[in-house]
Amino acid sequence: MTTTPTDDAASSSPDSPAHGTHGTHGTPVDAPATPQDTAAELADAMTRAIKRIRRRTSERLEPYGITPGQGRALRTLAHVPGCELPDRAMRLSDLADRLHIAPRSATTVVDALEEAGMVERTPDPADRRAVRIVLTDAGHAAVERIGQVRHEVALEYFGPVSPAEQDLLLRALRSAEAAYAATAPPRRTAPPGATR
């Protein structure tokens, strides 16, 4: 499997602990790590892990004609109770908001999914100016396939890590995310007149 310089930069750089002379940010390996060094190294490790998992997931979904962005959209739509009903399915504007992308980008993703028969656009019964995205049977099947691939890739990547360490890492990340969410400024909402 080929790798990109970005993925392996931290593991092959002269400042990496693997070279035996310096650790994170050029700190000597035998010097005690500071909380700042540990946090930065953890962030770097998470970035590498996410890139590797995303790449492998993308490779596994490619034969099915599903891109990572389309997979995220399908999974988001599927989490709405009644996602196959026109009066309960998610609005296009809400999908864009959940995916943290511009409504125009969400439209492009939905166009591709609709062309593949995985979703259908339908007018919102409560607001004819709005569009709801209905998940089709093919869309549900794709969501199941995506879930299976994600599960397989996660098991492959984290398989060498003990269940206890996995649990500890998960709890630490959940704690960090909860603290961040509690203090982060609210996200900007779509400007008036944006596509719904």
Image (cartoon, rainbow, N blue to C red):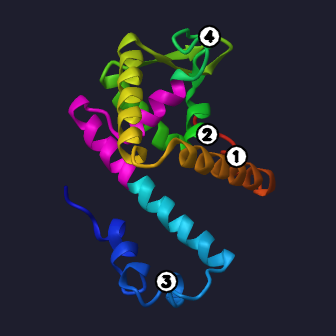
How far apart are the alpha carbons under marks 3 and 4?
A: 56 Å
Give the class, few, some or many, for how many residues have Cα within 10 Å of label 1's Cα (few <14, many ≥20).
few
User: Is 136 one of the magenta-colored residues?
Assistant: no
| Residue beneath disc 1 | 189
Instruction: Specify which label sits upstream in the sequence, 2 or 1.
Output: 2
User: Is 74 one of the magenta-colored residues?
Assistant: yes
Instruction: Specify which label sits upstream in the sequence, 4 or 1.
Output: 4
Kind of residue indicated by mark 3: Gly
| Residue beneath disc 3 | 23
Instruction: Specify which label sits upstream in the sequence, 3 or 4.
Output: 3
Q: Looking at this view, is 24 or 119 the one in front?
A: 24
135 relative position to 113: left or right: right
Kind of residue indicated by mark 4: Asp
Element assignment for label 3? loop
| Residue beneath disc 2 | 97
- Label pair 2/1, CB-CB below 8 angstroms: yes
